[in-house]
Amino acid sequence: MNFLSPSLLALAALAAPIVLLYMLKLRRREMEVSSTLLWQMVLRDREANSPWQKLRRNLLLFLQLLLLALLVLALARPFLPVAVVASGQITVLLDASASMSATDLSPSRFEAAQAVARRLARDLPGDGLMTLILVGPQPRVLASASADKGELTAAIDSARPSVGSANWEAAFALASGANGSVAHSTTVIVSDGGLPAHTPPLTGEVRYVPVGEQAANLGISALSLRPAPGGPQLFAGVANYGEAGAQTILTITLDGQLFNAQQLTVAAGQTAGVVLDLYEGVTL
């Protein structure tokens, strides 16, 4: 929590004189009496009003201190900072690659990313516009420069993850066109990683919101069968979409039986290829 007028918190020192007034009560005039049997209440009252006595439970004192605290806080004007787009154009790139279907987040990474996009739409300021781009193999614009929060929420709810990889180069081109020459623009990338090493320059501010755990993100990027003199050859490409190198075992099954298994080491952002010689009449 922050304060717009933190210097006014010094007014909390007014609690000291309030407490002091309860410790320094007025002394009563002393008088001699023949007996104290009937004066017990008077004696207790005198003890309570003697200077520098230990404070006792006093509801009125508590209420006065509470009122002072509320007054000081109101004058200091507390506020909570929230991450919202101040104004202008916001472009949300929603990762829809196959890895976003992973369930390390409940119910899935993609639905967690949708929740982030919904919050951005909900917090959109009155003069703000949002463009939503679904980043799959063929990125597409689900909502363009819209200030209608209902329309934006419906577009986010309609989004679905793909079974391929995300084409970030095409998505960045769409985002650049959406931002155009807007003075205040923000691009928010909601993804589980696998972004290209060199991101093209985008106008305005760029924010990255990660979703999911940073686990190995491997997938078969290519699979082809080609004729050869000694029999058909199978080419398989394994791509690493993660941010760190990873090892995996690629298994090939022919006619329902294990034909080959190879351990591959794939660097981050790279692809490893395997070529296997097959025999005529095989069924993959």
Image (tube, rainbow, N blue to C red):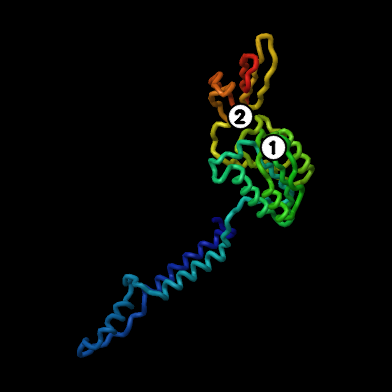
SS class, disc 1: loop
| Picture mark count | 2
Task: Report, in whole angstroms, how far the alpha carbon at label 1 lies from the one at label 2.
Answer: 15 Å
Q: Looking at the image, which residue is at 56% across and 19% down? A: 259
Q: Amino acid at mark 1?
A: Gly
- Which of disc 2 and disc 1 is earlier in sequence? 1
Residue 211, placed above or below residue 48: above
Q: Secondary structure at mark 2?
A: strand
Image coords of residue 177 (percent x, y): 78, 40
Residue at 41 percent of width and 73 percent of height: 61
Above or below residue 12? Residue 80 is above
Vertical relation: 178 (above or below) 227 = below
Percent coordinates x, y for residue 137 in the rendering? 70, 34
**Closer to the camera in the image, 154 or 82:** 154
Badge 2: residue crowd in 10 Å (few <14, some 14–19, many ≥20): some
Say the numbered circle drawn on residue 53.
none
In front: 134, or 55?
A: 134
- Residue 33, image x, y percentages: 23, 89
Residue under pointer 1 = 136
* Residue found at the far top of this picture: 229
| Relative horizontal placement of residue 115, taking residue 139 as reference (left or right) | left
The answer to which of 239 and 47 lies nearer the viewer is 239
- Please give the name of the residue rendered at 62% of the width and 14% of the height, measured from the top-left corner: 279
The residue sitting at 68% across, 22% down in the picture is 224
From the top left corner, tell me how far across and down residue 93 is, in percent: 69, 42
Mark 2: amino acid:
Gly
Q: Which residue is mark 2?
A: 219
